[in-house]
Image (cartoon, rainbow, N blue to C red):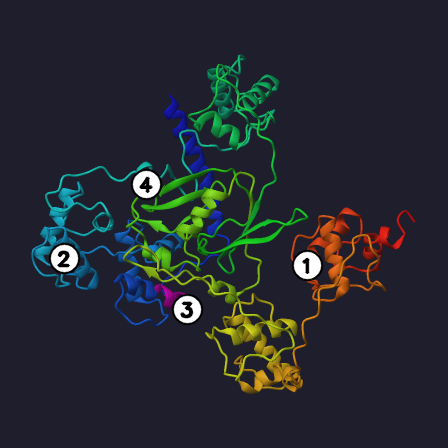
Amino acid sequence: MKRLLACLLLLAMMAALLPALSEEDAAGYQPLQYGDKGETVETLQQCLIDLGYYTGKVTGNFLKATRAAVEQFQKDYDLDVTGVVDGETEVLLLNAEYRALRYGIDGEDVKKLQEQLIRLGYLRTKATGKYRDATVSAVKEFQKQHSLEATGEATIATLRVLYSGYALAKGAQPTATPDPASMGGDMVIAGDGEALEDYAYLNQLSRGSTGEEVKMVQSRLKELGFFDGPVSGNYMNQTLASVKAFQEHNGLHVTGVTDEETWNVMFNDEHVLSTSATARPTPVPTPVPYAITVDVTNQITFVYGLDENGEYTVPVKQMICSTGTEATPSDLGDFVLSGRNARWCYFPAYGSHAQYWTKINEYIAFHSVTYSAVDYDALNVKSYNRLGRRASHGCVRLLVSDAQWIYENIREGVVVTITEDLPRDEELAKSLAAPPLNEARNGPSVTPEPTPAPEYVSGAMPPQPFRELKRGSNNEAVYWLQCKLKEMGYYEGTITGGYYQGTTNAVKAFQKDNKIRATGIADKRTLEAIYIEELTTPTPVPTATPAPTPEPEYISGGQPPLPLRQMRRKDTGEDVYWLQRKLQELGYFTGTVSGTYCEDTVNAVKAYQKDNSLTVDGAAGPKTLSHLYAEELGTAGK
C-alpha cells in the first residue's frame, strides 16, 4: 500500500511537469532543422564532428549530411529519429561523450575502444581504429561478462560501462557496484533536478485543504500518535492542531501548516519522533548567513554574506557554472532553499550522476559536473569543459569543489536568485574560467596560488614603457587601464587585468570621444591620450629624507593639541597621535600608535561615533573631537 501511494504521487508529479515543459518549449526556443543557416548550425556541426557523426565541413548550412548525422545520433541515444534538433537532442549533443560503434566504422574512437578492450584482456590484436570481426567478438565477450545484451555493437550503454571505473577484466569475478555510502554519503534519484522520494512533497497543505495528500498526513499522524480523529481528507482544526503538536515535538517551527520541511520529516526522515519519544527542542531562529545569485548572462554563481546593516552585499564566493540551455532554461526568479541535499544524485533519464546535490526547487538543483557512474574516474569531460556556457537541463552545474562548498555551507532559508538581467561582464567570466583538466586525476590541474592584485595609484605614472594592449592581454598595464577608464566613466565591468569585451568597448568609446580611430585596441597614441594628465605632471625632485622626529608626549587628561582640526585617513601629526592614545585609553583603538590616521584609526573613530550617537563617517571632525576631549577642554556637560 505504501509503495502504491508513492507511485500514485510520483505519477501525479510527472503529469504536473509535462505542461510546464511544453510551455517552456513554446516560450521562444526554435529547434534546428533542414534548411536552417547560421552560427548555431556551425556549433551543431562541430559537436557532430567531435563525436564522429559528421565528416563534412563546418558550413553553417543544415542540409542532407547534417540531417543524416543528427538522425544517427538520435537513433544511438534512443531519441525519436526526426532529424530535427529539438531541446532534448541539443542538450544530449552538448553533453554526449561517445557515439555508438559498430562493424565497418573507422576512427580514433574505435582505436580508443580497442585499446581499452586490450587492457581488459578481451582483444588480442593491435588497435587499428577499424571495427571489424575481432572487435565485434571482443565487444560481445565484454557484454556477456557485464550482463549486457551481447550484440557485438558498442552501444552507448556498453561504452559507459567500458570506460567506467568498475569495468571488469576478462575472467574477473563481478564485485558490487560502488555505492554512495562507500564514497561519502547518500544518493537521490532526480528527474529535472527533483528528488523522487518514497513520499514526494507536492503541495503545501493548510486549513481548508482536501484530498488524498491530507488523508496521508492524517494517517501518518495517527501512526505516530498525534491524531485520533477520522481520516477524512479534510484539513480542519483537529488536523491543524495535530500538525502543530507534531512540529513542536520534532523541533520544527510550529505553524500548523504541512510545508515541505514538515512533510519530509513526517514521511522521509527515519529519525522522525512519535509521541512516545523524547521531544526535540525547537531551534532558536538565527539570521540566514548567505544569499546566492545565479547570473545566467555570465554563467557565474555569486554568494554574498551579511554586511553591518543586515544586507547581503559582502562578496563571499564567485563560481563559474553551467545553467540550462536555451531549449531547457533554468527557472528564473527567487527561490528559498529547503535545505534538501545529497552526496550523489542520479538522473535516470540521461544515465548520468553528479556529486553534491543541493535542491533549489522542484525541478532544478546545484550539483557538480556530471559522471557516467558513481565513480570519481567516470567524469564526463564534456560537462567540465562546458563550464561557463549553457549546457544543462536546467540545473546549475559547478566545479566539484564549488558544489561541495554549497553542499557543506548552504542551509535551509537561503534565497537563491536566478536572473538573466545582469550586464555582460566577459572580464569577470574569463577570470573565473575552470582551469585546464588534468585527465590523469579527473580534476582541475594544479594551478599557482593567485597573485595579489596590482596596486593602482590614481594620478601616478602608469606602467612604462607603453605597449599595445588588446583582447587577450592580461597584465598589470591592463589592470591600470581598467582602473583609469573606470575613473573616467568609460569602463563598467570588473577590474581583473584581463582585456576582453568590456575593456574593448570602453577603449572604443574613449577613442570615439577623442577623435582617435575607434579600434578598441589600446595602442601607444590611445594610452598617451588616456594618461595625458599623468604624463604632463612634472616628476617631483627627490628631497632628502628628514631625520626621524621624536615621539610626541601624551599626557592622560591633559589638553590636546589646539586648535582642533578635522582629521581623516592618511593624515599624520601630533594631534593624530593624541587621538590614537585617547581612543586606546577608552578601549576603541587596538592598533599601533603611530601618529598616522590608518584604517584601524578609522574603525576606532567609527565605533566611538556610533556609541555616542554621532555621525558615523570615520573622520575626526570638530564635533567628534569636542565630544571626545570634553573633560580635557572643560566642556563636559555643557
Q: Is residue 255 left or right of residue 318?
A: right
User: Which residue is tagged 3?
Assistant: 39
Gap in angstroms between the C-alphas marked 4 and 2 = 38 Å
Q: Find numbered disc 4 in the image and state the secondary structure of the residue it sits on.
A: helix
Say whether residue 42 is magenta: yes
The residue wearing badge 1 is 593
- Residue hosting label 4: 183
Mark 4 vs mark 1: which is more N-terminal? 4
Direction from residue 591 to residue 629 in the image, left or right: right
Say what secondary structure mark 1 lies in: loop
User: Is residue 170 depicted above or below 297 in this figure?
Assistant: above
| Mark 3 vs 4, N-terminal side | 3
**Mark 2 falls on what kind of element?**
loop
Residue at the location (77% across, 51% down)? 609
Label located before the other in sequence (4 or 2): 2
Percent x, y of residue 426:
51, 66
User: How far apart are labels 3 and 1 at the CA level?
Assistant: 64 Å
| Among the 4 quarters of the image, the one containing residue 461 | bottom right
Query: Which residue occupies 51% across, 64% down?
Result: 428
